[in-house]
Image (tube, rainbow, N blue to C red):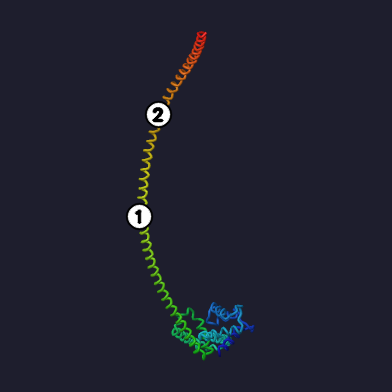
């Protein structure tokens, strides 16, 4: 089948009700038949759902499937899912018919089961499945179904498994290489961080020493400046003390002079009072002398007049 043919076939298998579209539930219903987890199916659905409306039309499905078809492993994965669906239907019919089979085949079945188990184990060992798979039950069930119901397709399935496990092994190797590279980068990053941390510590220590040195020099300079200011203030204080002493002495002298002046003023006042009394007495005497003089003048005038007569 072509890629589009496979897409249409898978769309019909998913759309069992013939709705014309596929929902998440339709794809999740095929989970037991597909070697994909529910999360991986959800990623496939979201990738195909171009308009994000929660459903896939045939156009969206075939277009998205064609994009997946660019990768061989994806095409074979979807082809394998279609094949497994038909195998499962056939297996269910075979089981119902096998319930009435002859009991004489039980011993052959036991022998075949042991042989199948041995062959499957050899196949898984050759593929290195134990390194990449935690649970081989799903692959084993499909392998047994193909071996029993479609043996002509078993080689194709095994080739498909070879390619899938080869890709998984390559991916695992790549993951390991990336982990190693990441560990190396982390170690180199840690070493670089440690180196930067040590350089930072040295730089901080150096700057701290420089700061302490500058701070010490600044403190010494400031201390010397304070000492000079203190000495200057002490000198000014001494000068002020001397000036105060001189002023006190002057005040004492002024007070002493004031007392003397007060005594002299008292003496002068007394003298002034005596002089005033003397002045008053002299004035009185002068008045009397003037009166006597006038009397004498009047007598002299009368005598003169009498003499002339």
Q: Are marks 1 and 2 in contact (CB under 8 Å)?
A: no
Image location of residue 225, percent across then percent down: 36, 50
* Between marks 1 and 2 in the image, the one whose residue lies nearer the viewer: 2
- Tell me the quarter of the image containing the N terminus: bottom right
Q: Taking 173 as reference, is 90 left or right?
A: right
In whole angstroms, how far apart are the C-alphas of marks 1 and 2? Answer: 60 Å
- Residue with the mark numbered 2: 257
- The local secondary structure at tag 2 comes to helix
Residue at the farthest bottom position: 152
Which residue is depicted at the point 36% across and 45% down? 232
Image location of residue 2, percent across then percent down: 56, 90
Q: Earlier in the sequence, mark 1 or mark 2?
A: 1
Bin the neighbour count of mark 2 within 10 Å (Cα to Cα): few under 14, some 14-19, many 20 and up. few
Bin the neighbour count of mark 1 within 10 Å (Cα to Cα): few under 14, some 14-19, many 20 and up. few
Q: Nearer the viewer, residue 61 or 188?
A: 188
- The local secondary structure at tag 1 comes to helix
Q: Nearer the viewer, residue 67 or 37?
A: 67
Q: Nearer the viewer, residue 61 or 288?
A: 288
Which residue is depicted at the point 39% across and 33% down? 250
* Residue 100 shows in this picture: no
Occupied quadrant, residue 56: bottom right
* Residue 48 shows in this picture: yes
Image location of residue 91, percent across then percent down: 56, 86
Image location of residue 221, percent across then percent down: 35, 52
Q: Taking 83 as reference, is 264 left or right?
A: left
Occupied quadrant, residue 267: top left
- Residue with the mark numbered 1: 217
């Amino acid at each position: 089948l072509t890629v589009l043919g496979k897409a249409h076939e898978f769309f019909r298998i998913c759309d069992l009700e013939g709705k014309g579209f596929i929902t998440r539930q339709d794809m999740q219903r095929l989970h037991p038949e597909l070697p994909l987890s529910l999360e991986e199916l959800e990623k496939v659905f979201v990738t195909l759902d171009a308009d994000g409306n929660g459903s896939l039309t045939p156009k969206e499905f075939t277009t998205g499937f064609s994009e997946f078809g660019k990768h061989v492993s994806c095409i074979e994965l979807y082809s394998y899912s279609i094949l497994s669906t038909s195998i499962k239907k056939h297996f269910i019919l075979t089981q119902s018919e096998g319930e009435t089979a002859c009991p004489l085949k039980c011993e052959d079945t036991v022998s075949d089961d042991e042989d199948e188990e041995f062959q499957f184990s050899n196949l898984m060992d050759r593929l290195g499945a134990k390194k990449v798979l935690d649970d081989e039950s799903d692959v084993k069930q499909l392998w047994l179904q193909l071996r029993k119901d479609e043996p002509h397709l078993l080689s194709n399935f095994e080739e498909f498994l070879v390619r899938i496990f080869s890709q998984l092994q390559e991916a695992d190797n790549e993951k390991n290489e990336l982990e190693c590279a990441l560990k190396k980068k982390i170690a180199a990053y840690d070493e670089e961080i440690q180196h930067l941390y040590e350089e930072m510590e040295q730089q901080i220590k150096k700057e701290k020493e420089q700061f302490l040195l500058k701070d010490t020099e600044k403190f010494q300079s400031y201390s010397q400046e304070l000492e000079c200011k203190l000495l200057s203030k002490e000198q000014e204080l001494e000068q002020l003390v001397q000036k105060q002493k001189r002023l006190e002495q002057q005040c004492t002298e002024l007070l002493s002079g004031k007392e003397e002046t007060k005594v002299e003023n008292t003496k002068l006042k007394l003298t002034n009072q005596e002089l005033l009394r003397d002045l008053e007495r002299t004035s009185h005497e002068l008045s009397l002398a003037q009166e006597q003089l006038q009397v004498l003048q009047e007598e002299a005038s009368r005598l003169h007049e009498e003499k002339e007569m």
